[in-house]
Amino acid sequence: MQNNSRQYIQSVSIIGILFFIFGFVTWLNGPLITFVKLAFDLDTDSKAFWVTTAFYMAYFFLALPSSWILEKTGMKKGMALGLLVMAVGTSIFGHFATERNYPISLLGLFIIGSGLSILQTACNPYISIIGPIESAAQRISIMGICNKTAGMLSPIVLSAFVLKDVSSLEEKVKNAADSTAREHILNEFASSIYWPYMIMALILVVLAFWITRSPLPEIKASEVNAEPVGKTPRNKTSILQFPYLLLGAFCIFVYVGVEVMAGDAIGTYGKGFGISSDQTKYFTSFTLFAMLAGYVVGLFTIPKIISQQTALKISAWLGIIFTGAALVTHGYWSVGFVAALGLANALMWPAIWPLAIEGLGRFTERGSALLIMGIAGGAIIPRIFATLKDEYDFQWVFFVIMLPCYLYILYFSVKGHRVGKA
């Protein structure tokens, strides 16, 4: 019994480290939007938001192939493979961003997202089913603390090494004597991204090797997450026969969309009020601090005080309230309510995931891949915002996009997660 307990703690700790790593890499996207707009001399926010599009669309294209890969390699080797793919993408981005080659830099981000797709397709069901499914949200909350702590640190680290005094740099570029001087300033700025990304690539390779040698046990998801007798028929032949899974996948889509809007787009939102880049580059950290607070709440309340469904319902209502508050306020107050959406969003992923995969049995890997495909919401929803804000008032665009998303999440928390369950 003691050995089982020790192995459980070791496994949760190792997965926690992996959540820290992909939290650090994922939440670099917010300040990267500021970086690419200046480094690549982009004239609109919409072009800069290709950062999130390239990164998150990888989940849509790679999620199902990731499930097939994991069926062949097992979850443990699949995690190591995901880290190696991330290392390749990180190297490509660091090299070609330095050369100010935007299309190939975006390819690097797509490859990073591809590696993360493999990693998340393995890690999320793993942490959900390593213990009782009823307490999965609690374990995912622990993972969320690791993820968002890293996310708070990543904008600070990138700002310290790459985006230091970025507002004065923008002025230098604007007031450059000629095109040659302008290009020299931009080339020097772009080159500052090289070593941070090369170091990240090396760390990812070392972690991949460590995972293969770690005591992390191999888990067969189809055996652990079996269909409850008397609840779910065993004659299912396709994941399409689980309506609650399909509704959950769309819930992940809109959830990740609003999460990225609150985390990565908050800097662009703040600039809409005329706030300087030297301040907006830290706004992502504020959102993630709010998310971290939400995860701590989830850790101590789920499932002892409230259920996963109740946590999701409360979170959806908070999202609706904070979105409305951001619309009717201005300046730092409005930005503060956008950052507060981090609190509303925190318990959504931990609650949606186990509700959507419960009882999938042998379809767990494929179902998890379908949910991972939903992460593409982080590519599409912020891009809609970036495109429309160039034509319409950014606060109204933000509201019109976010409100329906939170309303759907509320629906899933009340009814959607039960559809098709006996």
Image (cartoon, rainbow, N blue to C red):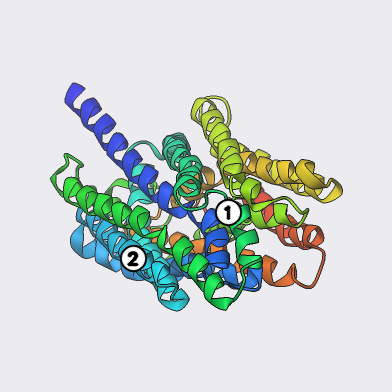
Is the residue under label 2 in contact with that under label 1 (CB below 8 Å)?
Answer: no
Residue 220 at least partly seen? no
Question: Is residue 338 something one can see in this rendering?
Answer: yes
Q: Is residue 296 above or below residue 412?
A: above
Residue 42 screen position, x and y as percent? 59, 73
- The residue at the point 48 percent across, 45 percent down is 160
Rendered location of residue 59, percent (x, y): 43, 65
| Extreme residue in the right direction | 328
Residue beneath the point at 79% across and 73% down: 391
The disc at residue 166 is 1
Amino acid marked by disc 1: Val
Q: Which residue bears the numbered disc 2?
A: 89
Q: Earlier in the sequence, mark 1 or mark 2?
A: 2
* Farthest residue, direction left: 213
Tell me which residue sits at (24%, 53%) in the image: 202
Residue 25's mark?
Answer: none
